[in-house]
Amino acid sequence: MRLRPSKFDYRTRRKDSPVRIVIYLAFILAGVYVLWGMRQGSFSPIGVPTPTATRSALSFAEEAEAAFSAGRLTDAVLAYQQAHQAEPNNVDYLINLTRIQTYAGDALGAADAARTAIVIAPESSMAYAVLAFALGSSGNYEEGETAAVKAIQLDGNNALAHAYYAEILTETLNWTRASESAELALQLNASLMDVHRVYGKYLEYVGAYEDAILQYKQAATINPNLPSLQLSLGLNYRALEEYEVSLEYFRRAQALDPLKIEPYLYISRTYFQTGDYQRATQWLEDATQVAIQINADSKVLADIFGRLGLIKHRSLDYEGAIEDLRCAIDGCQKNIDGKIVNIEGLKLADNNFQILTYYYTYTSVLAAYSPATPQLCATVQPLLPQIVLNSRNDSVILTITTDNYNTCIQTQNGVSPESTPDPNSTPTPTP
């Protein structure tokens, strides 16, 4: 059988041109690149929607309210800021942002948000109400009261406006008007957390601790995860000397916001009052770590060292007390876990009784040692007029200050003091 020749003649096969080869390679490389990009998430297949759709302002607002209810105040503030960015002219988002930002401890930033709300809605009673809340929380009571009055003028039935007005009146010790405004707010809307909180604050300030606890508990029923409510409950139970219950509430606040300094200080003070100086010191050391972690103002650290000085004074460690109190008053440089921290001293101002305590305890200990070390009086004497000026005419403090002055005068004159002050005789208030 004879084989027929093949139709393909290898000898006469035409080769592909170089241009065609380059085009083929380009297509192959492009395909490989697209497949690689899809695996990396850089490209999406045609016809498939992108996975990150633009979020609505409403979704941010809902997230903010959920975070606030859970006690995550920082997250709530951020979410409301995003809601405002998505809808800049929505005044409700700014109002809610102001309220939550104030609870989060940023009263100045909250006031700015409230002022923006007023620009958008000049006749908004609620915008003026939350401005009053922010201003009052920052200690700007005069402007805060003006804002509260304006809110009430715009809407006399605004329960929050009356509540925030009552809070400012409470802070400025205007008891009668504070009581009237707080009770009116409660009558207008008893379903609001802020209304019960403010009424509880008024009752606490006038010493009605048991009634205050009832109001704070009612507020905590509405929002059980707000750290400040837990702290208020703890403070009132401590005032009733129910220390274990107060510690329970302070620890709840600390668990809700581990990076908030106040719970650590309140727990330390409670242990100090019960005479457990070791635990009191440990909680202040923990507070120091938190302050470093959050990069707190150096005055926060100065306050912590002042409290440590009071504890050491009470536990008879006078040299340690002098070192820590000097740091709190004059400032110092500390090596804290390998980090060098410059601490600014605390100045006596605004009738701050806590700082006043550091000053007169410090001068008392130094005066007690001055007969043996006369040069200490050079530190004591310049501080005494400041203590008297800020003493609120407290007879105990004035007596201590007078004794310290006389001791230094007698020491400098080379006269042996008739009675050298006992460093532990200073009636140090609890830190």
Image (cartoon, rainbow, N blue to C red):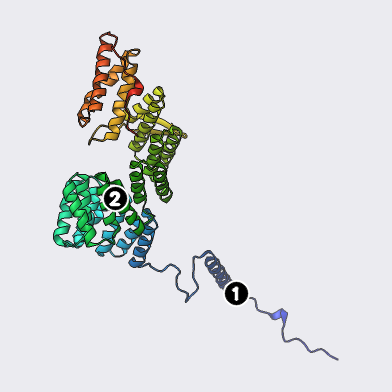
**Quadrant hosting residue 224:** bottom left
**Viewer-closest of 41 and 288:** 288
Q: Which mark is residue 410?
A: none
Rate crowding at label 2 as few (under 14), some (14 to 19) or many (20 or more) other CA atoms within 10 Å.
some
Residue denoted by label 2:
211
Circle 1 packing at 10 Å, graded few (<14), some (14-19), many (20+), is few
From the viewer's perspective, tell me whether residue 398 is left or right of residue 54. left
Residue ID for mark 1: 17
From this viewpoint, is residue 98 visible? no
Three-letter amino acid code at the position of disc 1: Ser
Which residue occupies the extreme left position in the image?
153
Q: Distance between the Cα atoms at labels 1 and 2?
A: 96 Å
Q: Residue at x 20, y 46 (%)?
A: 140
**Residue kind at label 2, given as amino acid type:** Asp
Q: Quadrant of the C terminus?
A: top left
Quadrant of the rendering where the N terminus is positioned: bottom right
Q: Is residue 128 above or below residue 372?
A: below
Out of 326 and 39, give the one closest to the viewer.
326
Q: Using the rendered view, name the quadrant where residue 56 is placed.
A: bottom left
Q: Is residue 296 visible?
A: yes
Q: Residue farthest to the top?
A: 414
Left or right: residue 140 compared with residue 238: left
Q: Secondary structure at mark 1?
A: loop
